[in-house]
Amino acid sequence: MEQVPIVKIGQTLFVSIQVDLQDESVLRLQEDLADELAATGARGVIIDITAVEIVDSFIGRMLTMIGSISRLFDAETVIVGMRPAVAITLTELGLSLSGVRTALNAEKGLEILNGRS
Amino acid sequence: MEADGSQARMADFLRDHQDKVVGRWIELVVAASRGRTSVEEVRRELADLYSLIVRVMSEADDHAAGELRAALDELSRGRARGGFTPRETALSVFSLKEAVYELVADAAEMVPEFLRFSRLLDDLGLRTFEAYSAAREQIIADQTTAMMELSTPVVRLWDGIIAVPLVGTLDSARTQLVMEKLLETLVATGADHAVIDITGVPTVDTEVAQHLLKTVSAARLLGAECTISGIRPQVAQTIVSLGIEFGDVATKATLADALGAALRHAGLKVVTA
């Protein structure tokens, strides 16, 4: 099982997903992120999915869930770098990722988080 | 096979009377074309066809049949583009029968030969029909592709603001294309605001609205905000009477309004110099 690294930069946790996500690795990421948020008190989470080419309804739901968990720690989640094909798939699946912010790239994602704090 | 003998005899007959038959054939075809093709062009086409038909009838070589089919396909394609009806195209083949019949009419011994020849021409006539419809379908397919390409421009209005002016009826295939093009442009340009202008969309029903909303939510997933502009009074009435909800998607009357809103959203202000 692949572990997704979580990097803390300032008040933000940065997660860059470089592999095609398996169900277990997403669950693991969710746990790790919750631990990390509790430990560091970070105010924002950026999840970079530029390299992700395949998503299904489970992963779509997990992304929303990560957003809800982060909010419990008073942190905002921004998903950045989604590919057009992935966006179309999620829309066709009827998932709009409510409660999660989105941005075109990591830079814009950081701007959103900085604008908030 | 006794048929081979009659076919060869017919081939000889056709070869002997070539000038007369071809001349008459050209006359008939030119008369039927009512000035849409020149005599020289018809002469060239028919002379080719005639020599191929003679070669097929005499069964001298194996390639003749294939070449004849290719020549007929070519002729039908040309006629299809020239606006001839398939009936006219097929008739131009059938009129060879008439031209030959005029010569063999009083020769009773040629009847079996003529019947075989006539059957061959029937086949060829049907072949032009098939080729004609294939050519027409090809033209329609080409036009559809051309229309698809024409109908989905994505334009940059300002730094970070792009617009998609939609013209024509929106169906699933077009929406998919528009969506892909819009999302790709958003990623390529790094724009975070898109205006979808539906001034040129004649009717907005529940299906079209559904397509538009899908496009907007896909763009949102990329982190871009969408505005729908160009809602005409009649369209607004239809939308309301159909009970379509655009939810929290911003809608504007004109593209100018939408651009203004997008500029404000980007923190820009237009001032007179």
Image (cartoon, grey):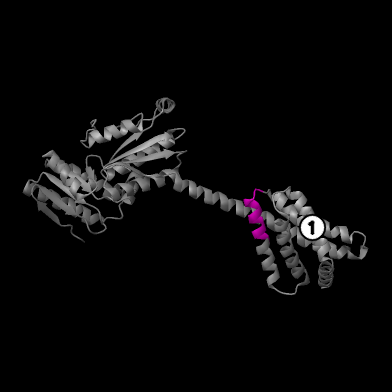
Give percent across and percent down for residue B273.
Answer: 23, 32
What kind of element bears circle 1?
A: helix
Name the one closer to the observer, B184 or B88: B88
The residue at the point 30 percent across, 34 percent down is B259
The residue at the point 14 percent across, 53 percent down is A32
**Placement of the C terminus of chain A among the 4 image quadrants:** top left
The stretch drawn in magenta includes residue B80: yes
Quick check: B3 left or right of B214?
right
Q: Is residue B240 above or below residue A69?
A: above
Counting every numbered tag in the picture gives 1
Label 1: how many residues lie within 10 Å, few (<14), some (14-19) or many (20+)? many
Quick check: B197 left or right of A73?
right
Name the one closer to the observer, A100 or A39: A100
Predominant secondary structure in magenta? helix
Q: Is residue B210 above or below residue B93?
A: above
Residue range of the region highlighted in magenta in the rendering: B72-83
**Placement of the N terminus of chain A among the 4 image quadrants:** bottom left
Q: Residue furthest front?
A: B273
Give percent across and percent down for residue B209.
Answer: 40, 35
The stretch drawn in magenta includes residue A71: no
Q: Is residue A65 above or below residue B202?
A: below
Chain letter of disc 1? B
Amino acid, disc 1: Trp
Q: Which residue is mark 1?
A: B25
Give percent across and percent down for residue B267.
Answer: 20, 35
Residue B251 in view here: no
